Amino acid sequence: MKKFSLLMMLLATAFVSFAQEGVAATEEETKVVIPEPSLGITTTELLIITLLVFSIILLFVAITLYKSFRVIYQERLNPTPYKTKEDRRLEYEEWVKLNGEKPSIWNKLLSLKPLSAEKDLEIPHAYDGIKELNNPVPAWFNVLFYGTLIFAAGYLYYYHIGEHGERQDDEYKTEMAKADLAKQKFLAKSASSVDENSVKVDPSQIAVGKGVFNANCIACHGQNGEGLVGPNLTDEFWLHGGSVKDIFKVVKYGVPEKGMVSWEKNMSSANISAVTNYILSLQGSKPANPKAPQGEKYDPAAAEAVAN
Ligand code: HEC
């Protein structure tokens, strides 16, 4: 019982450190954008598992307590009579006989022979009166043993002689190179990501922006931005401001209550920046069938004066 409680204590400490690791992993995930390899379970799930294990232990303890109380109770009602040495020997011999007739799973697994068969196992020699028994090694053990030899030979051939697989240090290098690549990719991506504070007027993006506009926006803003459901994007009048930042913001966040979609989730920030630049390039293009101006007139010079 002492051993058992020790085991449980060890299990509990292991679980606590396990849980802390999980928490640390999730904390790290919020800071670092490259997802760290984690346990794949949330703190809540961990809590549930801990509670489950705890309740199983509790059940086990309850059953043990119940059984011992029952034994105590029965012993009080009719105590087992005290056994003499003779009685006990008899019992042991009965047990041996029973065991000899029907080997238990344990005995079968270990290829143990019953004591009664000992005479047949004796090897005919004795040293200082000590006899040796011929107890064969169990078959499964032999299979395991020779299996490891065969595996080792295969391993040696595959990794060291044939050099078919990567060895540990090479594998480490490959993994590091992979991680480097992922890091570069990530850095390149974060460098190309813009938001409403860093977006700039950049005529080189207009061509890309036109493609983005044609693919996503003409249904509501017209073939040339003259306006349909959505407002005219070619005049100087804007509902939400005509600066590069204003336009970027409207495209990114949308005006959902007025029917303008938020594109944040379906479009990269680079594409939003490109389409913003395309819209700016439409200023004064005077397309056919323009929609009547909406909103206020935006004067870049005046806005700049205010900003400065
Ligand atoms: C489902 C129709 C719809 C689609 C698709 C749509 N828009 Fe709009 N857009 C609107 C409406 C409606 C408004 C006016 C919102 C308001 O009244 O505040 C608007 C407003 C805008 C404005 C602000 C105009 C101003 O006067 O301030 C910009 C800029 C804009 N859209 C750009 C785009 C771009 C770029 C796309 C494609 C990526 C796009 N829209 C796709 C319906 C749409």
Image (cartoon, rainbow, N blue to C red):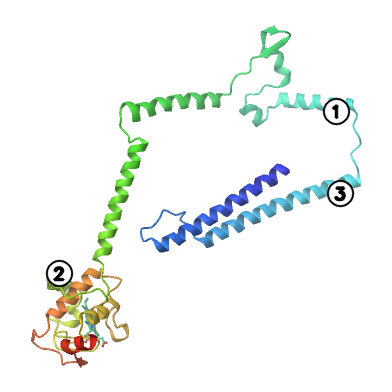
* Some atom of ligand 1 lies within 8 Å of the CB belonging to the residue at label 1: no
Please state the quadrant of the image where ligand 1 appears: bottom left
Q: Considering only vertical position in the picture, is 8 above or below 107?
A: below
Precedes in sequence: disc 2 or disc 1 = 1
Residue lying furthest front: 308
Q: Considering only vertical position in the picture, is 171 above or below 182?
A: above
Disc 2 secondary structure class: helix
Disc 1 secondary structure class: helix
Q: Looking at the picture, how far across and down is residue 144, in whole percent?
A: 51, 27
The dot on residue 73 is 3
Q: Is residue 80 visible?
A: yes
Residue hosting label 2: 208
**Disc 2 and disc 1: Cα gap in Å?**
96 Å
From the viewer's side, name the closer residue of 64 and 16: 16
Residues at discs 2 and 3 in contact (Cβ within 8 Å): no
Quadrant of the image containing the N terminus: top right
Residue hosting label 1: 88
Give, as a three-letter code, the residue at label 1.
Arg
Question: Who's the residue at 12% across and 84% down the image?
Answer: 283
Q: Is residue 291 left or right of residue 149?
A: left
Residues at discs 1 and 3 in contact (Cβ within 8 Å): no
**Disc 2 and disc 3: Cα gap in Å?**
87 Å
Tag count:
3
Give, as a three-letter code, the residue at label 3.
Tyr
Give, as a three-letter code, the residue at label 2.
Val
Q: Looking at the picture, how far across and down is residue 34, in whole percent?
A: 36, 58
